[in-house]
Amino acid sequence: MSAEQRKIVLGTRGSALALAQAEMTERALREAHPALEIVRKIIKTTGDRRIDVPLSEVAQAEGHLDKGVFIKELELALEGGEIDLAVHSLKDMPSALEEGFAIGAVLPRAPISDVLITKGGGGLKGLPEGATVATSSVRRQRILQWLRPDLKVADIRGNVPTRIRKLHASELSAILLAEAGLVRLGLLEEGVVISEGRSAPAEVLCPEEFLPAAGQGAVALEIRAGDEGLAGLLEALNDQETLEAVTLERKFLELLGAGCDTPVGVLSRVKKETLAMRVLVFEDGEEDPLGAEAEGPRGEPETLAQQLVENLLRRTS
């Protein structure tokens, strides 16, 4: 993008949450660059289209492994010049981007916790023995069964309002959703989720116990690598603390060889001069996860990620 070019085309998925994140991005861009013309282009992704199979199986069903099922079509639009930037929930992105793409900025992070939405209240401890909890995330499934082995888990697909609707209309006892999405959609009040005129009790799960996904709560703006003009425009939107934290989280996943559907929980903390992270990794066939933690100086996320992997490997030896 040249200095004279004052128009950008922003690509986004069409779900209510994706559109809310696009609106956040557009608002931030207009505040930073009032003269900038922004055009929004809605693009349907594989993950939006294939709701007939569990999310962990969508990539295999479509035959494009190791490619984020919620970003593939947006990256094709970027590559083809149809859009100039793509707005993503960062947790949907692969830990390492393909050549030709770059993260131009990340917006300030929303809350990172998971939320348990129930019919009867009482939270996680109050769920009756044998109750069924639905989530599309293998990480949430594994942590849930680790904390409450008596519970049953079920897969659930659809956007946020659709999943809440399914809770009310089914025999499910609870569902798990990200706090960030509920907050951005304005659905979460104190202890209650209200959607489409119906309310349900909600417990925000402690992230120290129920570790979030890498990148959870963060919104990434993806651009073509080498687009220095657009990268310069996005500098004003970038939140440095969020960038450092998610860079650490994603680098750890990359070194571990983990993908979007690998059951890994991470909790990073940006302090005044240091960066710290704790991780839980669930291996196939093992009920209990492997855990590790590390802390190091800010500005060295790659080094700290490597230390975390080494600490984890020592636990297996």
Image (cartoon, helix red, strand yellow):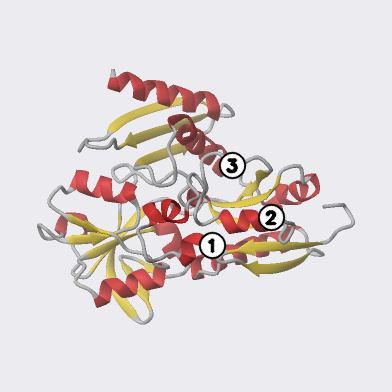
Amino acid type indicated by mark 1: Thr
Q: Of helix, strand and loop, which one carries label 1? A: loop
Q: Which residue is mark 2?
A: 78
Amino acid type indicated by mark 2: Leu
Mark 1 residue crowding within 10 angstroms, few (<14) / some (14–19) / many (20+): some
Residue 182 located left or right of residue 144: right
Q: Of helix, strand and loop, which one carries label 3? A: loop
Looking at the image, do the residues carrying marks 2 and 1 touch, with CB atoms under 8 Å apart? no
- Residue 280 image position (x, y, % from top left): 33, 36
Q: Quadrant of the C terminus?
A: top left
Rendered image: mark on residue 45 = 1
The residue lying toward the viewer, choosing from 159 and 31, is 159
Q: Residue at x 60, y 66 (%)?
A: 43
Rendered image: mark on residue 97 = 3
- Residue 184 image position (x, y, % from top left): 49, 64
Amino acid type indicated by mark 3: Leu
